[in-house]
């Protein structure tokens, strides 16, 4: 016996066994859709940042640069010296120009500081593997 969706929900002309299977399939379909929605939403929460954003964040972290003690900050004013530059390149696989890790070089005159910049979930960053080179 072939039944329409309306007749399944409203009347008892179709067998109750057939209605049970259709309702079960509908519930499974809804559950599958919800599962796919939740799994794709979790993948999008990986923190990522652009190259320019990473460079800007390093230049704005004056206290961190001062702690390094390599002459990137003016000791009298506490501000970053003139002609301090930052160059970052993304590491790993990026999405639309955004990465989770960067390798950055901070320089001033003959001093170069190479660091690994890691984007954190809590709207911040972490600097690892600092290496200082003076030419």
Image: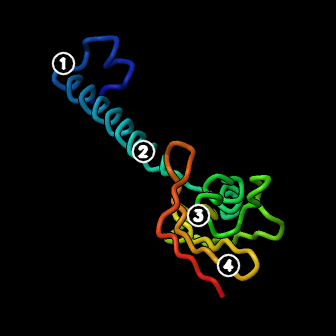
Between 106 and 76, which is closer to the camera in this rendering?
Answer: 76
CA gap between label 2 and label 4 equals: 42 Å
CA gap between label 2 and label 1 equals: 39 Å
80 vs 14, left or right, is right
Comes first in the chain, label 4 or label 1: 1
Position in image of residue 29 (x %, y %)? 33, 36
93 vs 23, left or right, is right
**Residue linked to disc 3:** 68
**Residue linked to disc 4:** 111
Mark 2: give few (<14), some (14-19) or many (20+) Cα within 10 Å: few
Residue at image coords 71%, 59%: 59
Residue at image coords 63%, 74%: 105
Q: Residue furthest top?
A: 11
Q: Residue furthest left?
A: 17
Is the C-beta separation of discs 4 and 3 under 8 Å?
no
Position in image of residue 127 (x %, y %)? 52, 61
Comes first in the chain, label 2 or label 1: 1
Q: Quadrant of residue 73?
A: bottom right
Comes first in the chain, label 3 or label 2: 2
**Residue linked to disc 2:** 42
Between 4 and 125, which is closer to the camera in this rendering?
Answer: 125
Is the C-beta separation of discs 2 and 4 under 8 Å?
no
**Residue linked to disc 1:** 16
């Amino acid at each position: 016996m072939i039944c329409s969706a309306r007749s399944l929900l409203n009347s008892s002309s179709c067998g109750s066994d057939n209605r049970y299977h259709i309702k079960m399939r509908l519930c499974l379909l809804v559950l599958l859709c919800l599962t796919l929605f939740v799994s794709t939403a979790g993948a999008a929460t990986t923190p990522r940042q652009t190259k320019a954003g990473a460079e800007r964040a390093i230049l704005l972290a004056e206290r961190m640069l001062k702690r390094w003690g390599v002459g990137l900050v003016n000791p009298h004013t506490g501000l970053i010296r003139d002609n301090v530059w930052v160059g970052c390149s993304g590491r790993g696989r990026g999405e639309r120009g955004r990465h989770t890790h960067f390798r950055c070089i901070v320089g001033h005159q003959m001093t170069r500081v190479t660091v690994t910049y890691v984007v954190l979930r809590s709207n911040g960053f972490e600097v690892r593997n600092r290496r200082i080179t003076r030419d």
